[in-house]
Image (cartoon, grey):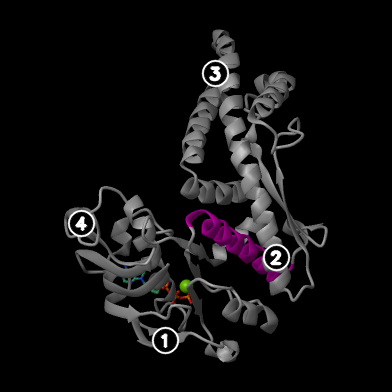
Amino acid sequence: MRLESIQLEHFRNYAGQRVDFDPVCNVICGENAQGKTNLLEAMVCLSTGKSHRTRSDRELVRFGEAGFRLAGSIHTRGRDFLSQLEAGFGRKKHIAVNKVPAKSASELSAVLNTVFFCPEDLQLIREGPAARRRFMDASLCQLRPGYAAALSEYQRLHEHKTRILRDCDERPDLIATLPDFNLRMAETGAVLIHYRARFAAVLAKYAAAAHSECSGGRERLEVRYQTVKTVADPLADQKLLVLQLLEHQRTHHYAEVSSRQCLSGPHKDDLEVELDGLNARSFASQGQTRTAALSLKLAAREIHKEIIGEYPILLLDDVLSELDPRRQEYVLNRLGSGQVFITCCEEDRLHALLKGRVYRVSGGVVTGG
Ligand code: ATP
Ligand code: MG
């Protein structure tokens, strides 16, 4: 899969711009606040129908204009596609693929998939379990429709059960409804664990390989899926998982009622990340944190490739800073196949770049390539 060219009209700080891309590596250089991230954001919009930074399409419209248009020429599955997105102009958002209006944004992702890495993704290593659950959920929802359905059902049940626990002091009769919620949460929870355990196992393998290569074999990254304590083997049969989840709920019943919180279930899952046997959240340096977070994203890209048969395009925003020359060289030259876009502030990092094109962005104008 590759993005051959992109056209932006009144998008962020771009007035009107067309850029043709290299099939392998594209490096986008420029000073701060010139439009590097905005260019990657436009690619995300063409892949998902929305920005990763904001929910409001209004923010994407260049100041003083009425709307924006994006178009991308994409080559995938041996064919050429034209994806278009238009918002503002006092009309409903308009999406089209090959000039045929699309019913939903999923038609864009059927043509262009992106894996995006930005400085905020360092949260994957630095923050609590919620950040890593979001990462697992986002990847699995894109790839497995069965997972997306189970996740939204589980979240609905979780919210409802939390409301019951909160209100059961005033309405003790609500307690009687808990067994039914517990059973349904155990059943959908087992589906989540089933998918997450398999995802984490493959992720661990690819992330360890990426981290080892990037660090020149000096560091060992381990990723482990952690779920409800009573689940001895998360890869076990789902029927067994249901029983083990029910057992955990049973032993936590009084704690749940007295704390008025839902304490049992895979909504507390985590992906434990260790570097050379030490918890990465507490002990990783800045460069190690960046390498580990990048390795998780690269592993997600490999899983995409296994499932859809082609690499999604990889967007790396500001990934080179804080990496030593060896790690920079890995990012620039050794990410394997697939098309890559990398932004950076300083061109002097690029003496290591072996192939690909370098673009310069200044004030919303792209030159070079
Ligand atoms: P950095 O190196 O600091 O990350 P960058 O090149 O990635 O910089 P961008 O995030 O792409 O910078 O943003 C560039 C500029 O775009 C910002 O100065 C911002 O004010 C401007 N900008 C953002 N939204 C709009 C908009 N809707 N209309 C016009 N300009 C905008
Ligand atoms: Mg930026």
Marker disc for residue 32? none
Q: Position of residue 75 (x, y in %)?
A: 36, 69
Q: Position of residue 196 (x, y in %)?
A: 62, 43
Query: Could you tell which of marks 4 and 1 lies nearer the N-terminus?
Result: 4
Q: Secondary structure at mark 1?
A: strand
Q: Is residue 29 above or below residue 131?
A: below
Q: Position of residue 116 (x, y in %)?
A: 50, 64
Disc 1: which residue: 360
Residue 208 relative to residue 159: left or right: right
Query: Could you tell which of marks 2 and 1 lies nearer the N-terminus?
Result: 2
Query: Could you tell which of marks 4 and 3 lies nearer the N-terminus?
Result: 4
Res 80 quadrant in image: bottom left
List the single residue furthest toward the front: 78
Q: Secondary structure at mark 3?
A: helix
Marker disc for residue 209? 2
Disc 4: which residue: 100
Disc 3: which residue: 167
